[in-house]
Amino acid sequence: MGDPTGFMNYKRKLGTDRDPAQRIGDWDEFHGHLPVKELALQGARCMDCGVPFCQTGQIIGGMASGCPINNLIPEWNDLIYSGLWREALERLHKTNNFPEFTGRICPAPCEGSCVLGINEPAVTIKSIECAIVDRGFEEGWIMPEPPEIRTGKKVAVIGSGPAGLACAAQLNKAGHLVTVFERDDRIGGLLMYGIPNPHLDKKIVDRRVDILAEEGIEFVTNTEVGKDIDGNELVKNFDAVVICTGATKPRDLPIEGRDLDGIYFAMEFLRANTKSLLDSGLSDGRYISAAGKDVIILGGGDTGTDCVATSMRHGCRSLLQFEILPQPPTERAVDNPWPQWPRVYRLDYGQQEAMAVFGEDPRRYQVLTKRFIGDAEDRVAELETVRIEWYRGDDGRMSFREVEGSEQRWPCGLVLLALGFLGPEQELLKQMNIRTDERSNAMAEYGKYMTNIEGVFAAGDSRRGQSLVVWAINEGREAARECDRYLMGSTDLP
């Protein structure tokens, strides 16, 4: 700990974001880094706690607390305070294959469990992490490092999202011959087509994928295992298979009017937009446009926010976002103590942009959608809602009831369903006879990752259900370790 009183001497600071009203005019990233000297002082705020909860990922109260990949946060905070940036990058890469991704899109459960955060603003862990890796690329410190020795063992990884890429990277380091199969035309999975460019620039994804390819990983695109290739053929032709297909089955809203035109799943909207942006700068028109429309987004979370930001860049006429839960408090509630993830009111980047244009947070809480109403051409024209109130039942569980007389109609020309995901698509799992759990996820014990089929592993959202990118990286790394153990009898992978 370079400055024992740094947490008392320096206030929390973040880099300056571009103005929300201006940045919606383009699709570029908008976060800025603090100057190096300022970042060093932010690193000095780290207390080097006796028990650093920030780096111990666990589930508390049903949500992530601390870093699931066990980033050595106090170590690299101290190193940048001392000006040892390359050493900080080495510490960062010991636990995280892709800090340039997590430093941008992770919600930072590490900061939620920062000890300083008990009574002061937490250390700016996420922004420091991003600054370290960005400088690493700028300085040329991050270069391809192919393994010196190959084992001759072949591994197929199905899916190129964060779990698949992390798994492939680790298995390649162990010397195995890794082939990653991706059904889309570009590598990255959720990182490529599930997150808009302003939130994660695709050049950053491609940059890392290019390094992985130079290190010897083979990427096969436009190939859906289960359709274009039989999953059982991979089992025959490879020494091991790791399923990292994600949880991509969206939650629907089967109410009256659902079959009207103009109602889409969030990922349909986000994927088409990013593909068109990358293919043609949106000039091909092959995307779902919110331009000039009254947009309503059903559901919150990161996906809902990304839909808000994308709609704002299209130039929507109006925008609302409905959530069924109550508005969170501005500070931790009594039943949400540290080090749990703080369930508090936040204004994310998309909502900031909507506020800049329309003058208010677009979110409306405790709203239940009852039906969609169409026009003469069977396009959605209105959405009918009712207010609800939450209460605790006799069994102790929370339930809701409709508020009498609170029915309301809202004009809308585009509805986006951001209601979460129900689990992995089932075709591949059925084809390979993979057992599933009660939530339809591939059944594989956490920490072991082997499915009921010998030599076939599962990791990430396809195993645990919808979760954070950082959990996907954690599972991809751990599944690689267990796969290496299976192939070689022992493993040196972390």
Image (cartoon, rainbow, N blue to C red):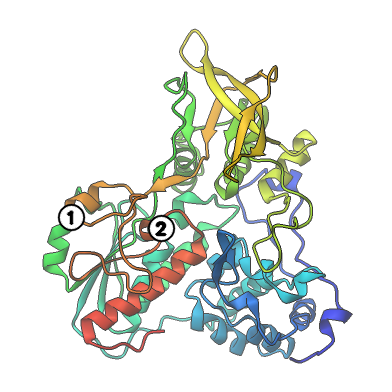
- Position of residue 89 relative to residue 108, above or below, is below
Left or right of 47? Residue 207 is left
Given this view, does label 2 or label 1 mark the residue nearer the observer? 1
Residue at numbered disc 2: 461
Q: Residue 388: where, in percent of width, then height?
A: 66, 30
Which quarter of the figure has residue 454? bottom left
Quadrant where the N terminus sits is bottom right
Crowd around label 1: few <14 · some 14–19 · many ≥20 (10 Å) = some
Q: Residue 369: where, in percent of width, then height?
A: 57, 26
Which quarter of the figure has residue 435? bottom left
Crowd around label 2: few <14 · some 14–19 · many ≥20 (10 Å) = many
Q: Is 481 or 228 nearer to us in this picture?
A: 481
Q: Is residue 215 visible?
A: no
Residue 433, numbered label: 1
Q: Is 86 or 164 nearer to us in this picture?
A: 164
Q: Tag 1: residue type? A: Asn
C-alpha span from label 2 to label 1: 18 Å
| Secondary structure of residue under mark 2 | helix
Q: Residue 485: where, in percent of width, then height?
A: 27, 83
Left or right of 365? Residue 368 is left
